[in-house]
Image (cartoon, helix red, strand yellow):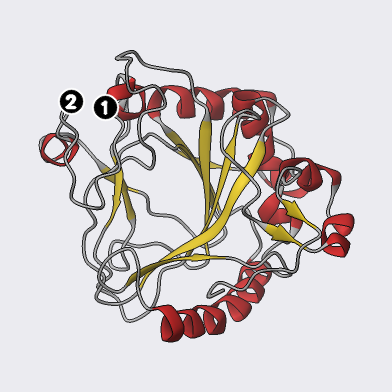
Amino acid sequence: MKIQLTEQELITKQLDPETLAIAVEQVKTNGYILFDKVLSEEKIKNIRKSFDPLFDEFIERKGYNTGTNRAQMFLPVMQPFIDEDVICNPIATAVLDKILGADNRCTYFASDTPMPGADYQNVHSDTMPLFPELSIPLPIFSLVVNIPLVDVTEENGPLEVWPGGTHLNPDMANHDTLDGSVNPHLHIVRAAEHMLSEKVLMSAGSIVIRDIRMWHRGTPNKSNDRRTNLAMIFSKSWYGGGSYIQIPQDTYDQMPQKAKDAFRMEKIGFPAKMPWE
C-alpha cells in the first residue's frame, strides 16, 4: 500500500495518528508500507552524488555479489549517508517504534543496486527461521527500511513483493533461497509462481518499511542506469548480533539522540569502514 503524505505531515515530519495507525496495520497484516516521496529531491541528489562514485569504485575492486550486474554494498558511516532524514527519519521511526518498541536498534546499513542488465533474483525471505523447530507464525522482530535514490519504474528493476501474509507463514517457511537452496518445509520459489505479487514503484526519496520475512525478489533492470536503494535493518533490542557497523566517536557524538539510540550496540570509536575493506 502507498501512502501519500499531506503537506502538513511533510513539513512537520509527524504522521497524523490515523495515518500512523494505518501504516502499522499494513506492515502487520500486508507485510509492508510505502510512504511516497518523503525526502527532498535536493537531499537525494546530494546523496547520490556521493554514492555513485563510491559504488563504481566498489564494483571495480570487488565486483557484483548478489546476482548478475547486481550488488549489495555496505555504506560508510559518514555524511551524506547518515543524514538524519535517512537514519532516523521521524516518519519511519514512528512506525518502527510502534511495531518494534522504542528501544529498537539498527544493525545493517547498506545499499542494493541492480545495474543495467541485472536479472531476476530467486524469490526469497531475508531471514532463516528464528526458531526452526517451531511451525507457528511469530510476531514481527525485524523490519527493513529502503530509500530509493532514483524513481523506481517498471523498467529499472523494481522490487517485487508477495504481500498479504508471506511474512506470517509458520516460522519454518522462512528461507533465504538466493543460493539456490530449497526449504524442505515449503518450496518458496515454486509457490510464489502461483501467487499474487506486486512491484513496488515509487519516487526517489520514498520510504518503504517491510517485514524482513516477507517474500520478495529483485527484477531485471532494462533501463540504461542504476537503480539504487539505501537499505537499513531495524530490530527488536534483543535480536541480531550488532557490533558490525564502525562509527567514529566524533561522528557518533554528533548524531541526533534517536540515531545514537539506534546504533548504540555497534562499534563506536572505530574508523568509518569503506565498502571494500
Q: How many marks?
A: 2
**Residue type, numbered disc 1:** Ala
**Residue type, numbered disc 2:** His
Q: Earlier in the sequence, mark 1 or mark 2?
A: 1
- Residue for point 21% across, 60% down: 120
- Residue for point 67% across, 33% down: 104
Name the residue nearer the viewer: 11 or 151: 151
Separation of marks 1 and 2 at Cα, in angstroms: 6 Å
Task: Describe the element under mark 2 as helix, strand or loop.
Answer: loop
Image spot of residue 273 (x, y percent): 65, 69
Say whether marks 1 and 2 touch (CB < 8 Å): yes
Image spot of residue 116 (x, y percent): 30, 77
Q: Which residue is mark 2?
A: 185
Name the residue nearer the viewer: 149 or 174: 174
Residue 69 drawn above or below residue 198: below
Image spot of residue 131 (x, y percent): 39, 22
